[in-house]
Image (cartoon, helix red, strand yellow):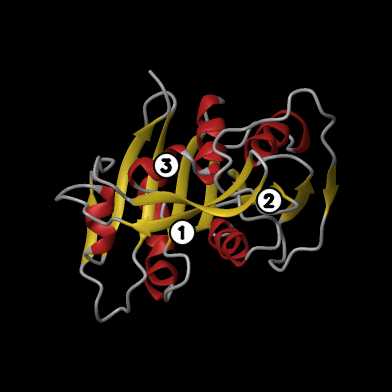
């Protein structure tokens, strides 16, 4: 039976990781190893100099091995592969992330950071993401089908499958787009607003504006036009 590692960056209690573990159960024995708290936008950060705590947790999906850790998503994957699991996993599923991982936002994503960590260990890895607050009906209808398709499709070294589900209704859904490349158009733009001043010290808070201009055949272009985006992303050459 396949051993499947499930990790995320939204934390062990997130709705997305429970839904993903339920899907993963259909393909093998599932080991969930996830951070105890939210780690979004932490990219591939890791704690090499701090001891890492790992403990079993009650999990809403029966029949899976579930652990929380004090570390980052990348730490979770590394400790799972090297210590927690009985041998290297056959597959790694990362997500389901609350928010798209497309365009240059991928470089900030700790869901993708966890996926790239698994890929570095030679594990066939798929990252799943969806709109952070809209309906998830497209995700729930198609995620198992897409996972089944991508499990058997080859990846190069240090490469992952990156899947993003649009936040539209089933009636608005337009289909799947394969071979989506990472958009080079803006995904969001940030500006810094002054929160307070104390002498020469100024406190700023970033504010984001969506700049959705994804072109044809890109990940961003797919999701903003109500397609599922499916493509490969390479960590490094």
Q: Which mark is residue 99?
A: 1
Precedes in sequence: disc 1 or disc 2: 2
Q: Is residue 83 left or right of residue 101?
A: right
Please say if the residues under marks 1 and 3 sit with CB atoms less than 8 Å apart. no
Element class at badge 2:
strand
Q: Residue furthest bottom?
A: 171
- Residue 84 placement: quadrant: top right
Question: Looking at the image, can residue 87 be seen?
Answer: no
Precedes in sequence: disc 3 or disc 2: 2
**Towards the viewer: 89 or 173:** 173
Q: Horizontal and vertical percent for residue 188?
A: 35, 52
Which quadrant would the C terminus be assigned to in this image? top left
Please say if the residues under marks 3 and 2 sit with CB atoms less than 8 Å apart. no
Which mark is in front, 1 or 2?
Answer: 1
Which quadrant would the N terminus be assigned to in this image? top right
Element class at badge 3:
helix
Q: Residue furthest front?
A: 199
Which mark is in front, 3 or 2?
Answer: 3
Q: Residue at x 71, y 37 (%)?
A: 80
Q: Horizontal and vertical percent for residue 22?
A: 59, 64
Q: CA distance from mark 1 to mark 3?
A: 11 Å
Q: Residue at x 41, y 44 (%)?
A: 105
Q: Residue at x 72, y 66 (%)?
A: 62
Q: CA distance from mark 3 to mark 2?
A: 22 Å
- What crowding class fits label 2: few (fewer than 14 Cα within 10 Å), some (14-19), or many (20 or more)? many
Q: Horizontal and vertical percent for residue 149?
A: 35, 51
Q: Which residue is mark 2?
A: 32
- Residue 50 placement: quadrant: top right
Q: Which mark is residue 106?
A: 3
């Amino acid at each position: 039976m396949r051993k499947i590692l499930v990790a995320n960056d939204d934390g062990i209690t997130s709705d997305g990781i429970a839904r993903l573990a339920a899907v993963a159960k259909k393909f093998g024995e599932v080991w969930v190893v996830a951070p105890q708290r939210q780690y979004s936008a932490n990219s591939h950060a890791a704690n090499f100099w701090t001891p890492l705590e790992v403990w079993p947790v009650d999990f809403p999906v029966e029949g899976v091995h579930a652990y929380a850790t004090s570390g980052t998503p990348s730490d979770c994957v590394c400790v799972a592969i090297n210590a927690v699991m009985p041998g290297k996993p056959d597959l790694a599923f990362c997500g389901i992330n609350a928010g798209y991982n497309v365009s240059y936002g991928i470089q900030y994503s700790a869901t993708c950071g966890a996926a790239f960590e698994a890929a570095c260990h030679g594990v066939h890895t798929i990252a799943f993401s969806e709109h952070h607050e809209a309906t998830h009906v497209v995700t729930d209808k198609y995620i198992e089908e897409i996972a089944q398709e991508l499990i058997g499709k080859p990846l190069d070294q240090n490469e992952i499958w990156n899947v993003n589900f649009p936040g539209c209704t089933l009636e608005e859904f337009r289909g799947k787009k394969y071979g989506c490349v990472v958009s080079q158009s803006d995904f969001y733009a940030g500006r810094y607003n002054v929160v307070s001043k104390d002498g020469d010290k100024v406190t700023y808070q970033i504010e984001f504006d969506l700049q959705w201009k994804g072109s044809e055949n890109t990940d961003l272009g797919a999701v903003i036009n109500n397609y599922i985006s499916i493509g490969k992303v390479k960590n490094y050459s």
